[in-house]
Amino acid sequence: MNIRSVVRGVGHYLPERIVENAEFEGKLDTSDEWIRSRTGIERRHFAAEGEMTSHLAIKAAEAALKDAGLQAADIDAIVVATSTPDFTFPSVATMVQAGLGSTHGFAYDVQAVCAGFVFALTNANGLILSGQAERVLVIGAETFSRIMDWEDRSTCVLFGDGAGAVVLEAAEGRGNRDDRGILSSDLHSDGRYRELLYVDGGVSSNGKAGHLRMQGNQVFRHAVTKLAQTAHTALDKIGLTGADVDWLVPHQANSRIISATADKMGLPMERVVLTVQDHGNTSAASIPLALSVAKEQGKLHAGNLVVVEAIGGGLAWGAVVLRW
Ligand code: UT7
């Protein structure tokens, strides 16, 4: 018997407030035209005052449970990918557990910045394959608006808030690449590049929350090579290539990075899920948000081969191949 981690449900939540590019024009030396043409971003959502990462995560989790037709008590583990937790501790995941009214199982956070959901998905797959959990709620949730330097036009126009969630469930497969569920994973990190993208605050350094700092063009350079490479490696592990992919669901940071990656994989943009125009970069939330939106749009069908990939602070990057 071969166990696979199959996606049983997916859901998302976006805060109510939508901020169009034009809103930045009066405050900064920037333009809708620059933001749109350099990034593909048109608008993003920002959390309301007092609305925290756990609140977004709980709403996304409820939507994913509803989509799966399950109750919170059916979930054995909750893994939340976030770099913007409500508090230093406890984890956002334990707040989600309590928010869902569950005392069953266990919950913890994973922090790999924008690659967080890819790492969390791989981690949750490990919980299922090792028999520690049958159903895992995997959530990406962020409030990056809280770590923006509003005077830095090179970063503050890029990010947004939101949350997405999937329910993974153990299912029997045949052990081949036709199985539904997670088929392969490829993860990397290289801490030598930590200064390309970081937050200049933290508990153990200066006791502040800090602001996001990024050398955007350097990160861009790494992204356009590393993302296609990791996607290729993950596919190669199971003897597949870009030609076999039905949907590329990439981290949504920049439409130019996304199209360059798709191009290297030999995929036309018709097979790429693009949400960056409406969400901006929501870090670890971007992939589950994109999966949920794609499902709502009727794009994802049982049996589709889906590749998710992301890169972010660390640097940390990776890809997961799954059959929907
Ligand atoms: O999610 C985690 C991973 N992060 C990413 O994947 C982000 C990767 N990087 C990027 O998406 C892009 O590098 C950016 C969108 C951040 C920047 O685009 P770029 O084409 O790499 O531009 P640049 O940083 O090389 O800057 C070009 C020019 C500069 O002006 P000068 O020096 O040429 O005069 C910037 O000062 O654009 C200027 N600029 C802006 N101008 C208007 C930077 N931000 C803005 C802005 N409005 N908001």
Image (cartoon, helix red, strand yellow):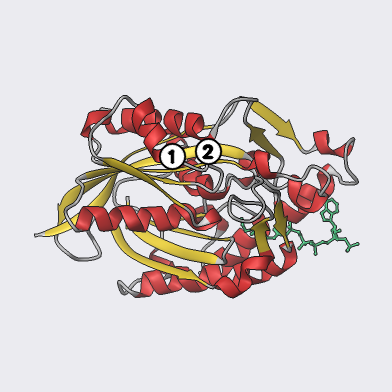
Q: Check disc 2 and report its element: helix, strand or loop.
A: loop
From this view, report whether residue 316 is shown above or below residue 72.
below
From this view, report whether residue 281 is shown above or below residue 256.
above
Task: Confirm whether residue 181 shows in the render.
Answer: no
Callout 2, which amino acid? Phe
Callout 1, which amino acid? Pro
Image quarter where the N terminus lies is bottom left
x then y, percent, for residue 70: 25, 30
Q: Quadrant of residue 91?
A: top left
Q: Residue at x 20, y 66 (%)?
A: 176
Q: Residue at x 34, y 27 (%)?
A: 100
| 25 sits to left or right of 15 | right
Q: CA distance from mark 1 to mark 2?
A: 7 Å
x then y, percent, for residue 297: 47, 37
Question: Which disc, if any, is residue 87?
Answer: 2
Residue where numbered disc 1 is placed: 90
Q: Quadrant of ligand 1?
A: bottom right
Q: Check disc 1 and report its element: helix, strand or loop.
A: loop
